[in-house]
Image (cartoon, rainbow, N blue to C red):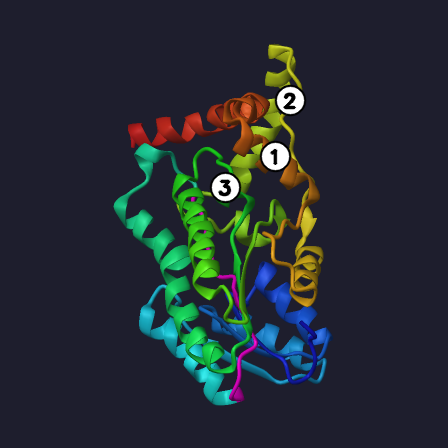
Amino acid sequence: MQLHSQTVVAITGASSGLGAALALELASRGVSLAICARRADRLADVAARAREYGVNVFEQVCDLSEEDQARDFIRECLRHYGRLDVLINNAGRGNCASVEHTTSERLQSIFSLNVFSLWYTTAEALSYMRTVHKGRIVCIASVAAKIGYPFNSAYVAAKHAVAGFVASLRAELAGSGIQASLVCPAAVDTEWQQASEDASIGDLFAQGIRRSRRIAADLGVPRAPLGKLMSAELAAQRIIQSIEQDEADDVYTHDDSIELVLRCAEHRELYDQAMLPLFLGMQEAYSPDIQNSENA
């Protein structure tokens, strides 16, 4: 897909992190934007920075977990521009809790934003894209859409659901001229890891990684295979490249993620063995939280 000044890209969750990086990278390429998020001040700042590139920016404050607000964002984008070429479903939120400490309220919150909102925005976008027989739906999932990590089961399950959503959507769109793609980033350096619900999943991973080195040495096994942290800007460039090149496969921003995903898909036990030091390290790091919650 050729991106130019007439191209309209809608991005959800654009007030920070990967969403903001995508907006600014696209703006630098002259693309017209429609962006939304819950935090008005942060969204306005991203919009102002994008406009410095001389592009058109439509911004709307909304909570995508609310169906009427999610659908209204796409409708207003179409009213404003009269077209929509790419929808990037980026909004998402993580959690940090064991299975037994994950409440029904947290499950509803995580799935409402990460999963249910996809139906609302995508359905509205398709109502236009089907009339012009072209367009692209991009869903930002995570490498956690293909593999699992401890203490964020609600998020991992939600991202697995995103992978299923895209797989079904691609089947529905076959031959329509509309494309759908799944993006699976690994660790990206944003505030997302600190803003997860219940506690910071980023802090838990960091503590687990530190402990995993000792555990691997004690067990006499290799350290868990962990990829490098990537900047949001570099991840955004990789995602936009996949759009420009009309990539049909799932998109992995981190090259080393593919090997890990394939190992898990082909032989889950081998994956679990390779990741054991990290899993045990995270268990150690999480244990004080369990004790504190039980003694509260």
The residue segment tinted magenta is 81-95
Q: Characterize the local packing of mark 3: few (<14), some (14-19) or many (20 or more) Cα atoms within 10 angstroms.
A: many
* Quarter the C terminus occupies: top left
The residue under label 1 is: 260
Determine which of the numbered discs, if any, sits on residue 213 in the image. Answer: 2
| Helix, strand or loop for disc 1 | helix
Determine which of the numbered discs, if any, sits on residue 153 in the image. Answer: none
* Quarter the N terminus occupies: bottom right
- The amino acid type of the residue labelled 3 equals Ile
- The amino acid type of the residue labelled 1 equals Leu
Residue name at image x 65 percent, y 35 percent: 259
Q: Earlier in the sequence, mark 1 or mark 2?
A: 2
Q: Cα distance, mark 1 to mark 3?
A: 20 Å
The residue under label 3 is: 201
In the image, taking residue 196 as reference, residue 250 lies left or right, namely: right
Image location of residue 244, percent across then percent down: 69, 67
Q: Nearer the viewer, mark 1 or mark 3?
A: 1
C-beta proximity under 8 Å, tags 2 and 3 = no
Q: Characterize the local packing of mark 2: few (<14), some (14-19) or many (20 or more) Cα atoms within 10 angstroms.
A: some
Q: State yes or no: residue 91 in magenta.
A: yes
Number of numbered discs overlaid on the protein picture: 3
Image location of residue 210, percent across then percent down: 62, 27
| Helix, strand or loop for disc 2 | helix
- Predominant secondary structure, magenta span: loop
Nearer to the camera, 276 or 17: 276
Nearer to the camera, 105 or 144: 144
Image quadrant where residue 28 sits: bottom right
Q: Earlier in the sequence, mark 1 or mark 3?
A: 3
In the current view of this chain or complex, which residue is farthest to the left? 104
Image location of residue 51, percent across then percent down: 66, 81
| Helix, strand or loop for disc 3 | helix
C-beta proximity under 8 Å, tags 1 and 2 = no
